[in-house]
């Protein structure tokens, strides 16, 4: 039973460390922040923890999306963090989820992708993966979907974030 809670403890610990990063500007300057951010990246994307995340994600959708949230926040924090996520392919399942056809999963997935869309490296990644194109096509089809009215506000928020940082995105899609 002791191994069951390993991921939960680490995730809480990592979130606490990450929270400390947002305040480290006045505590030793940016060199200290960069050093600690690198340590965090090594811990978060260690092969052991990534494997534990993958196993734990199989428990249920709630757990899976909580882990996706940790990953999305981590990846959006820096281009280096996103690179670590790409190397471990831990983000790809989230990108696949938004194409699953399940409305609730789409809504939750788009909310998390909005976090990535708020960073330039995240927007670039989503564009290169074809995710923005897929979401734009999905968005158009939601107009005719009986439950599309529940999902459209989340999609509008996602594309609103995209347009805030990259006004040309609306014209491209």
Image: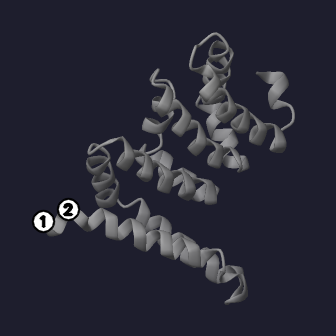
For this view, does 111 lie left or right of residue 39? right
- The residue depicted at 45 percent of the width and 24 percent of the height is 102
Q: Please tell me the numbered disc located at residue 14.
A: none
For this view, does 52 lie left or right of residue 21? left
- The residue depicted at 33 percent of the width and 53 percent of the height is 53
Identify the secondary structure beneath mark 1.
Answer: loop
Q: Residues within 10 Å of mark 1 (few under 14, many from 20)?
A: few
Task: List x then y, in percent, for residue 154.
Answer: 65, 35
Spatial distance from mark 1 to mark 2, Cα to Cα? 5 Å
Q: Residues within 10 Å of mark 2 (few under 14, many from 20)?
A: few
- The residue depicted at 27 percent of the width and 42 percent of the height is 58
Residue bearing the label numbered 1? 1
Q: Is residue 46 above or below residue 167?
A: below
Residue bearing the label numbered 2? 4
Q: Residue furthest top?
A: 144
Q: Are marks 1 and 2 in contact (CB under 8 Å)?
A: yes
Identify the secondary structure beneath mark 2.
Answer: helix
Q: Quadrant of the C terminus?
A: top right
Task: List x then y, in percent, for residue 155.
Answer: 67, 31
Residue 172 location, quadrant: top right
Q: Is residue 33 above or below residue 67?
A: below
The reply to whether residue 41 is in sight is: yes
For this view, does 155 lie left or right of residue 62? right
- The residue depicted at 69 percent of the width and 32 percent of the height is 153
All told, the count of numbered labels is: 2
Residue 137 location, quadrant: top right
Q: Is residue 2 above or below residue 72?
A: below
Q: Quadrant of the N terminus?
A: bottom left
Residue 126 location, quadrant: top right
For this view, does 7 lie left or right of residue 15? left
Q: In the depicted view, which residue is nearer to us: 135 or 85? A: 135
Q: Is residue 44 above or below residue 123?
A: below
């Amino acid at each position: 039973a002791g191994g069951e809670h390993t991921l939960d403890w680490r995730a809480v610990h990592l979130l606490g460390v990450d929270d400390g990063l947002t305040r480290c500007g006045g505590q030793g300057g940016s060199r200290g922040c960069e050093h600690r951010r690198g340590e965090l990246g090594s811990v978060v994307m260690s092969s052991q923890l990534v494997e534990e995340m993958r196993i734990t994600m199989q428990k249920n959708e709630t757990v899976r999306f909580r882990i996706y949230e940790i990953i999305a926040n981590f990846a959006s924090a820096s281009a280096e963090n996103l690179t670590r996520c790409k190397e471990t392919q831990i983000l790809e399942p989230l990108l696949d989820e938004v194409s699953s056809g399940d409305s609730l999963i789409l809504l939750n997935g788009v909310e998390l992708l909005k976090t990535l869309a708020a960073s330039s490296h995240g927007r670039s990644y989503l564009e290169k993966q074809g995710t923005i194109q897929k979401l734009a096509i999905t968005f158009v089809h939601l107009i005719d979907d009986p439950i599309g009215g529940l999902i459209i506000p989340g999609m509008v928020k996602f594309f609103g974030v995209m347009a805030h940082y990259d006004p040309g995105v609306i014209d491209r899609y």
